[in-house]
Protein backbone atom coordinates (compact mmCIF):
# COMPACT_ATOMS: atom_id res chain seq x y z
CA UNK A 1 0.00 0.00 0.00
CA UNK A 2 1.20 3.51 -0.76
CA UNK A 3 1.54 6.19 1.87
CA UNK A 4 -1.60 7.78 0.42
CA UNK A 5 -3.62 4.75 1.54
CA UNK A 6 -2.33 4.56 5.10
CA UNK A 7 -4.87 4.38 7.92
CA UNK A 8 -4.07 7.75 9.49
CA UNK A 9 -5.68 9.36 6.39
CA UNK A 10 -8.76 7.11 6.43
CA UNK A 11 -12.36 8.27 6.82
CA UNK A 12 -12.93 5.44 9.29
CA UNK A 13 -10.37 6.75 11.76
CA UNK A 14 -12.16 7.79 14.97
CA UNK A 15 -10.92 9.65 18.08
CA UNK A 16 -7.84 8.40 19.91
CA UNK A 17 -6.38 6.95 16.68
CA UNK A 18 -8.80 4.00 16.64
CA UNK A 19 -9.99 2.20 13.48
CA UNK A 20 -13.77 2.44 13.16
CA UNK A 21 -14.28 0.15 10.15
CA UNK A 22 -15.89 -3.15 11.15
CA UNK A 23 -14.51 -4.71 7.95
CA UNK A 24 -10.90 -3.80 8.67
CA UNK A 25 -8.47 -6.20 10.38
CA UNK A 26 -7.57 -3.24 12.63
CA UNK A 27 -11.16 -2.63 13.81
CA UNK A 28 -11.27 -1.14 17.32
CA UNK A 29 -7.47 -1.18 17.47
CA UNK A 30 -5.11 1.76 17.79
CA UNK A 31 -3.81 2.74 14.37
CA UNK A 32 -0.05 2.62 13.89
CA UNK A 33 1.63 5.15 11.56
CA UNK A 34 2.30 2.57 8.83
CA UNK A 35 -0.99 0.59 9.03
CA UNK A 36 -3.06 0.18 5.85
CA UNK A 37 -5.79 -2.17 4.63
CA UNK A 38 -8.08 -2.89 1.66
CA UNK A 39 -11.02 -1.00 3.21
CA UNK A 40 -9.29 2.37 3.16
CA UNK A 41 -11.54 5.37 2.40
CA UNK A 42 -9.68 8.63 1.91
CA UNK A 43 -10.44 11.61 4.16
CA UNK A 44 -8.97 14.75 2.47
CA UNK A 45 -9.43 16.68 5.73
CA UNK A 46 -6.42 14.87 7.19
CA UNK A 47 -4.12 16.25 4.48
CA UNK A 48 -5.35 19.80 5.09
CA UNK A 49 -4.91 19.29 8.84
CA UNK A 50 -1.32 18.07 8.48
CA UNK A 51 -0.51 20.91 6.09
CA UNK A 52 -2.08 23.45 8.45
CA UNK A 53 -0.09 22.04 11.35
CA UNK A 54 3.17 22.39 9.42
CA UNK A 55 2.40 25.96 8.30
CA UNK A 56 1.29 27.05 11.77
CA UNK A 57 4.84 26.51 13.03
CA UNK A 58 6.20 29.46 11.00
CA UNK A 59 5.01 33.07 11.58
CA UNK A 60 5.27 33.94 7.88
CA UNK A 61 2.83 31.15 6.90
CA UNK A 62 0.21 31.73 9.61
CA UNK A 63 -2.33 33.11 7.10
CA UNK A 64 -1.95 30.00 4.94
CA UNK A 65 -2.25 27.84 8.07
CA UNK A 66 -5.60 29.47 8.86
CA UNK A 67 -6.93 28.53 5.42
CA UNK A 68 -5.70 24.92 5.65
CA UNK A 69 -7.05 24.39 9.17
CA UNK A 70 -10.44 25.93 8.41
CA UNK A 71 -10.74 23.68 5.36
CA UNK A 72 -9.84 20.60 7.40
CA UNK A 73 -12.47 21.43 10.02
CA UNK A 74 -15.11 22.07 7.35
CA UNK A 75 -14.42 18.74 5.60
CA UNK A 76 -14.63 16.82 8.87
CA UNK A 77 -12.03 15.40 11.24
CA UNK A 78 -12.21 12.96 14.14
CA UNK A 79 -13.14 15.02 17.20
CA UNK A 80 -9.72 14.91 18.83
CA UNK A 81 -8.05 16.02 15.59
CA UNK A 82 -10.68 18.75 15.24
CA UNK A 83 -9.91 19.84 18.80
CA UNK A 84 -6.22 20.12 17.97
CA UNK A 85 -6.97 21.92 14.68
CA UNK A 86 -9.23 24.45 16.39
CA UNK A 87 -6.62 25.31 19.00
CA UNK A 88 -3.97 25.72 16.31
CA UNK A 89 -6.42 27.93 14.42
CA UNK A 90 -7.01 30.04 17.53
CA UNK A 91 -3.27 30.44 18.04
CA UNK A 92 -2.87 31.56 14.43
CA UNK A 93 -5.64 34.15 14.75
CA UNK A 94 -4.08 35.41 18.01
CA UNK A 95 -1.09 36.62 16.03
CA UNK A 96 -3.36 39.18 14.33
CA UNK A 97 -5.58 40.00 17.33
CA UNK A 98 -3.72 42.90 18.92
CA UNK A 99 -6.83 44.98 19.67
CA UNK A 100 -9.38 43.95 22.34
CA UNK A 101 -12.34 44.49 20.02
CA UNK A 102 -10.79 43.06 16.87
CA UNK A 103 -12.54 40.30 14.96
CA UNK A 104 -9.28 38.33 14.96
CA UNK A 105 -9.06 38.27 18.76
CA UNK A 106 -12.72 37.23 19.05
CA UNK A 107 -12.16 34.40 16.57
CA UNK A 108 -8.96 33.37 18.34
CA UNK A 109 -10.78 33.07 21.66
CA UNK A 110 -13.75 31.34 20.01
CA UNK A 111 -11.63 28.61 18.41
CA UNK A 112 -9.40 27.97 21.43
CA UNK A 113 -12.44 27.87 23.71
CA UNK A 114 -14.14 25.30 21.45
CA UNK A 115 -11.03 23.14 21.75
CA UNK A 116 -11.19 23.38 25.55
CA UNK A 117 -14.86 22.36 25.56
CA UNK A 118 -14.09 19.38 23.30
CA UNK A 119 -11.32 18.29 25.64
CA UNK A 120 -13.61 18.63 28.65
CA UNK A 121 -16.56 16.78 27.12
CA UNK A 122 -14.52 14.13 25.30
CA UNK A 123 -12.18 13.50 28.25
CA UNK A 124 -9.14 13.45 25.96
CA UNK A 125 -6.70 14.84 28.54
CA UNK A 126 -5.24 17.13 25.88
CA UNK A 127 -4.79 20.17 28.13
CA UNK A 128 -3.60 18.04 31.03
CA UNK A 129 -0.41 17.42 29.07
CA UNK A 130 2.26 19.96 30.17
CA UNK A 131 3.09 21.14 26.65
CA UNK A 132 -0.56 21.91 25.86
CA UNK A 133 -1.26 23.38 29.29
CA UNK A 134 1.50 25.91 28.60
CA UNK A 135 -0.15 26.88 25.30
CA UNK A 136 -3.26 28.02 27.20
CA UNK A 137 -1.35 31.19 28.15
CA UNK A 138 -2.52 32.70 24.85
CA UNK A 139 -6.17 32.10 25.72
CA UNK A 140 -5.58 33.42 29.24
CA UNK A 141 -4.22 36.72 27.90
CA UNK A 142 -7.00 36.93 25.31
CA UNK A 143 -9.59 36.64 28.07
CA UNK A 144 -7.87 39.41 30.06
CA UNK A 145 -7.96 41.72 27.04
CA UNK A 146 -11.69 41.04 26.57
CA UNK A 147 -12.40 41.52 30.28
CA UNK A 148 -10.74 44.93 30.24
CA UNK A 149 -12.69 45.92 27.15
CA UNK A 150 -15.92 44.91 28.92
CA UNK A 151 -14.90 46.91 31.99
CA UNK A 152 -14.28 50.01 29.89
CA UNK A 153 -17.60 49.73 28.07
CA UNK A 154 -19.98 48.20 30.61
CA UNK A 155 -18.33 48.44 34.01
CA UNK A 156 -16.44 46.31 36.51
CA UNK A 157 -19.39 44.11 37.52
CA UNK A 158 -19.87 42.86 33.95
CA UNK A 159 -16.13 42.24 33.65
CA UNK A 160 -16.18 40.22 36.88
CA UNK A 161 -19.11 38.13 35.60
CA UNK A 162 -17.24 37.47 32.35
CA UNK A 163 -14.13 36.34 34.22
CA UNK A 164 -16.09 33.99 36.49
CA UNK A 165 -17.81 32.47 33.46
CA UNK A 166 -14.51 31.80 31.69
CA UNK A 167 -12.78 30.40 34.77
CA UNK A 168 -15.52 27.78 35.12
CA UNK A 169 -14.59 26.30 31.74
CA UNK A 170 -11.38 24.95 33.30
CA UNK A 171 -12.91 23.33 36.38
CA UNK A 172 -12.47 19.94 34.71
CA UNK A 173 -8.69 20.30 34.94
CA UNK A 174 -6.82 19.38 38.11
CA UNK A 175 -5.46 22.92 38.39
CA UNK A 176 -6.55 26.11 36.65
CA UNK A 177 -4.18 27.37 33.93
CA UNK A 178 -5.81 30.84 33.91
CA UNK A 179 -3.19 32.65 36.00
CA UNK A 180 -3.57 36.13 34.51
CA UNK A 181 -7.35 35.87 34.71
CA UNK A 182 -7.19 34.96 38.41
CA UNK A 183 -4.89 37.93 39.04
CA UNK A 184 -7.29 40.19 37.13
CA UNK A 185 -10.23 38.96 39.21
CA UNK A 186 -8.33 39.48 42.46
CA UNK A 187 -7.48 43.03 41.34
CA UNK A 188 -11.14 43.74 40.56
CA UNK A 189 -12.23 42.68 44.04
CA UNK A 190 -9.37 44.63 45.64
CA UNK A 191 -10.48 47.70 43.69
CA UNK A 192 -14.02 47.24 44.99
CA UNK A 193 -12.68 46.99 48.54
CA UNK A 194 -13.64 43.31 48.93
CA UNK A 195 -10.56 42.12 50.77
CA UNK A 196 -11.86 38.59 51.40
CA UNK A 197 -12.64 37.74 47.77
CA UNK A 198 -9.48 39.42 46.51
CA UNK A 199 -7.47 37.20 48.87
CA UNK A 200 -9.34 34.09 47.70
CA UNK A 201 -8.35 34.58 44.07
CA UNK A 202 -4.77 35.70 44.75
CA UNK A 203 -4.30 32.56 46.87
CA UNK A 204 -5.96 30.38 44.25
CA UNK A 205 -3.48 31.70 41.69
CA UNK A 206 -0.54 30.91 43.96
CA UNK A 207 -1.87 27.39 44.55
CA UNK A 208 -2.10 26.63 40.81
CA UNK A 209 0.31 24.10 39.39
CA UNK A 210 3.06 25.41 37.14
CA UNK A 211 1.62 26.23 33.73
CA UNK A 212 4.83 26.70 31.78
CA UNK A 213 7.95 25.00 33.20
CA UNK A 214 10.15 26.94 30.75
CA UNK A 215 8.45 30.28 31.53
CA UNK A 216 10.14 32.12 28.68
CA UNK A 217 10.04 35.84 29.38
CA UNK A 218 9.27 35.25 33.06
CA UNK A 219 5.55 35.99 32.67
CA UNK A 220 4.38 33.25 34.99
CA UNK A 221 6.83 34.03 37.79
CA UNK A 222 6.01 37.73 37.47
CA UNK A 223 2.27 37.04 37.70
CA UNK A 224 2.76 34.93 40.80
CA UNK A 225 4.94 37.64 42.34
CA UNK A 226 2.22 40.24 41.74
CA UNK A 227 -0.28 38.02 43.52
CA UNK A 228 2.08 37.65 46.50
CA UNK A 229 2.70 41.39 46.65
CA UNK A 230 -1.01 42.18 46.41
CA UNK A 231 -1.78 39.74 49.22
CA UNK A 232 0.70 41.57 51.44
CA UNK A 233 -0.97 44.86 50.56
CA UNK A 234 -4.32 43.42 51.58
CA UNK A 235 -2.90 42.85 55.05
CA UNK A 236 -2.79 46.64 55.40
CA UNK A 237 -6.49 47.44 56.02
CA UNK A 238 -6.34 51.06 54.87
CA UNK A 239 -4.89 50.10 51.50
CA UNK A 240 -7.98 48.34 50.15
CA UNK A 241 -10.99 50.28 51.37
CA UNK A 242 -10.95 52.90 48.66
CA UNK A 243 -9.03 51.18 45.89
CA UNK A 244 -6.72 54.25 45.78
CA UNK A 245 -3.58 52.23 46.46
CA UNK A 246 -0.89 54.81 45.68
CA UNK A 247 -2.69 57.77 47.27
CA UNK A 248 -3.30 55.73 50.42
CA UNK A 249 0.38 54.71 50.55
CA UNK A 250 1.48 58.35 50.18
CA UNK A 251 -0.95 59.97 52.62
CA UNK A 252 -1.11 57.08 55.09
CA UNK A 253 -4.88 56.61 55.47
CA UNK A 254 -7.86 55.82 53.29
CA UNK A 255 -9.84 58.70 54.82
CA UNK A 256 -7.11 61.33 54.38
CA UNK A 257 -8.60 64.49 52.77
CA UNK A 258 -6.35 64.14 49.74
CA UNK A 259 -7.38 60.52 49.20
CA UNK A 260 -11.03 61.54 49.43
CA UNK A 261 -10.47 64.15 46.70
CA UNK A 262 -8.87 61.62 44.35
CA UNK A 263 -11.58 59.07 45.07
CA UNK A 264 -14.26 61.64 44.31
CA UNK A 265 -12.54 62.58 41.05
CA UNK A 266 -12.40 58.91 40.09
CA UNK A 267 -16.06 58.22 40.89
CA UNK A 268 -17.59 61.50 39.70
CA UNK A 269 -15.47 62.27 36.65
CA UNK A 270 -13.28 59.46 35.32
CA UNK A 271 -15.94 56.75 35.52
CA UNK A 272 -18.27 58.85 33.41
CA UNK A 273 -16.06 58.66 30.32
CA UNK A 274 -14.59 55.83 28.26
CA UNK A 275 -11.08 57.30 28.35
CA UNK A 276 -11.42 57.76 32.11
CA UNK A 277 -12.36 54.13 32.61
CA UNK A 278 -9.33 53.11 30.54
CA UNK A 279 -7.12 55.24 32.78
CA UNK A 280 -8.61 53.57 35.86
CA UNK A 281 -8.09 50.10 34.36
CA UNK A 282 -4.44 50.91 33.62
CA UNK A 283 -3.97 52.39 37.10
CA UNK A 284 -5.23 49.27 38.85
CA UNK A 285 -2.99 47.10 36.74
CA UNK A 286 0.23 48.47 38.26
CA UNK A 287 -0.82 50.51 41.31
CA UNK A 288 -0.74 47.75 43.97
CA UNK A 289 2.87 46.92 43.13
CA UNK A 290 3.85 50.61 42.87
CA UNK A 291 2.14 51.37 46.18
CA UNK A 292 4.19 48.67 47.88
CA UNK A 293 7.46 50.20 46.65
CA UNK A 294 6.44 53.78 47.46
CA UNK A 295 5.18 52.86 50.91
CA UNK A 296 8.64 51.61 51.93
CA UNK A 297 10.40 54.92 51.28
CA UNK A 298 9.84 58.30 52.95
CA UNK A 299 11.69 59.93 50.07
CA UNK A 300 9.49 58.22 47.48
CA UNK A 301 6.35 59.32 49.32
CA UNK A 302 7.54 62.92 49.39
CA UNK A 303 8.57 62.85 45.75
CA UNK A 304 5.23 61.46 44.56
CA UNK A 305 3.33 63.88 46.80
CA UNK A 306 5.20 66.94 45.48
CA UNK A 307 5.75 65.99 41.83
CA UNK A 308 2.48 64.19 41.06
CA UNK A 309 -0.28 64.55 43.62
CA UNK A 310 0.02 68.27 44.40
CA UNK A 311 -0.20 69.31 40.71
CA UNK A 312 -3.00 66.78 40.19
CA UNK A 313 -4.97 68.18 43.13
CA UNK A 314 -4.52 71.71 41.79
CA UNK A 315 -5.86 70.62 38.39
CA UNK A 316 -8.84 68.88 40.00
CA UNK A 317 -9.66 71.93 42.11
CA UNK A 318 -9.23 74.25 39.12
CA UNK A 319 -11.49 72.08 36.98
CA UNK A 320 -14.17 71.98 39.66
CA UNK A 321 -14.08 75.77 40.05
CA UNK A 322 -14.54 76.25 36.31
CA UNK A 323 -17.47 73.86 36.24
CA UNK A 324 -19.02 75.71 39.18
CA UNK A 325 -18.65 79.04 37.35
CA UNK A 326 -20.44 77.56 34.34
CA UNK A 327 -23.15 76.07 36.54
CA UNK A 328 -22.39 72.44 35.64
Image (cartoon, rainbow, N blue to C red):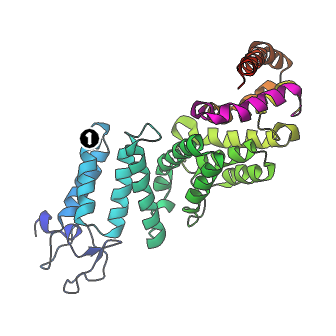
**Is the stretch drawn in magenta largely helix, strand or loop?**
helix
| Magenta span of residues | 254-278
In the rendered image, residue 267, in percent from the top left (x then y), is placed at 73, 35
179 horizontally vs 128: left or right: right
Which residue occupies 33% across, 64% down?
Answer: 81
279 horizontally vs 228: left or right: left
74 horizontally vs 327: left or right: left
Q: Nearer the viewer, residue 218 or 315?
A: 315
Q: Nearer the viewer, residue 222 or 279?
A: 279
Q: Nearer the viewer, residue 79 or 148?
A: 148
In the rendered image, residue 191, in percent from the top left (x then y), is placed at 73, 42
Which residue occupies 56% across, 64% down?
Answer: 173
Question: Is 294 placed above or below 278 here?
Answer: above
Dot 1 lies on which element? helix
Q: Is residue 249 visible?
A: no
Q: Nearer the viewer, residue 211 or 159?
A: 159
| Residue farthest to the front, as pictured | 327
On the image, which quarter does residue 227 sit in? top right
| Residue farthest to the bottom, as pictured | 22
Which residue occupies 58% across, 62% down?
Answer: 168
Amino acid sequence: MSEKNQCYRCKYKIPKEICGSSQSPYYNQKIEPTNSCDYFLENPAQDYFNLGLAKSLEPETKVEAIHELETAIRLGLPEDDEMSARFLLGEAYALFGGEPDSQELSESINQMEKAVLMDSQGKYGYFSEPINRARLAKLDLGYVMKARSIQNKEGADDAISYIHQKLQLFDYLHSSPMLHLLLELGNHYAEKGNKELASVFYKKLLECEVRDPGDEGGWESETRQWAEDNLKLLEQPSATKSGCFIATAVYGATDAPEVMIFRGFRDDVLLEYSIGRKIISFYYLFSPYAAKLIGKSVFAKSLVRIMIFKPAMWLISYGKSKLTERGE
